[in-house]
Image (cartoon, rainbow, N blue to C red):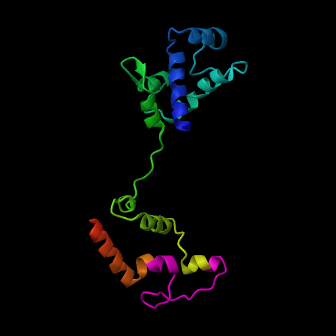
Amino acid sequence: MKIWNKAVLLKYLWALAMKKDTLWIKWAHNYYIKNRDIAEMDTPKAATWVIRKIIEAREDVKQMRLGQNSLISTLETLVKQGKFQIHRAYVQMQPQFPKVMWKSIHLHTHIYPRLKFHLWLAIHQRLATVDRLMKFGIQAPLECVFCATNMKAFEHLYFGCPNTHKLWDRVLKWLGITR
């Protein structure tokens, strides 16, 4: 919602920058902007909170500049057929996270919800393994239940133990994922 609200503020900033023919824009230009460049002017302290928020939205435009030099040219990339596209601004302002390999495993349709939850715990290293139990003061044997060797719990359990390695290979093969 926060990003959507910022995108809507950009629409109003674009309307102010383009000096659209509406009463509130004429009023804002007459009382607050007064023939100054909206990209360079300071935010008027006497302005209403809405006008201040609209003018402060310039910072969001600076963060999303796509190689353009000016505020107006950046805002114009979000216009289609003379109308500002809030959806374009919203998509442009969305943070881009790196793609992760395990997404297709976790979101697979054939996995039961409890197994998805267990996988989520494993991904965030929140399982009740020996090393986590010891952090809470709970004593547990340091031997792997699958191969009876001493271990560093999480890494060994999921990546080091030959028995769980075979199990993971079978699960991934069943899901159609090769690694």
The location of residue 82, given as percent across then percent down, is: 39, 17
Residue 29 sits above or below residue 102 on the image: above
Q: Quadrant of the N terminus?
A: top right
Q: Residue at x 42, y 80 (%)?
A: 160
Q: Quadrant of residue 84?
A: top left
The location of residue 96, given as percent across then percent down, is: 45, 46
Q: Nearer the viewer, residue 34 or 23?
A: 23
Q: Nearer the viewer, residue 59 or 68?
A: 59
Q: Quadrant of residue 129?
A: bottom right
- One can see residue 158 in this view: yes
Q: Quadrant of residue 32?
A: top right
Q: Residue at x 56, y 27 (%)?
A: 58
Among all residues in the image, which is located at the extreme right? 46
Residue 16 sits above or below residue 69 on the image: above
The stretch drawn in magenta includes residue 24: no
Residue 170 sits above or below residue 81 on the image: below
The location of residue 6, given as percent across then percent down, is: 55, 32
Asked whether, in this view, residue 68 is left or right of residue 3, the answer is left
Residue 43 sits above or below residue 33 on the image: below
- One can see residue 62 in this view: no
The stretch drawn in magenta includes residue 146: yes
Q: Nearer the viewer, residue 174 or 79?
A: 174
Chief secondary structure of the magenta portion = loop
The location of residue 53, given as percent across then percent down, is: 63, 26
Asked whether, in this view, residue 63 is left or right of residue 50, the answer is left
Among all residues in the image, which is located at the extreme bottom? 148
Q: Which residues are magenta?
A: 134-157
Q: Residue at x 72, y 21 (%)?
A: 45
Q: Quadrant of the C terminus?
A: bottom left
Asked whether, in this view, residue 6 is left or right of residue 67, the answer is right
Q: Residue at x 50, y 8 (%)?
A: 21
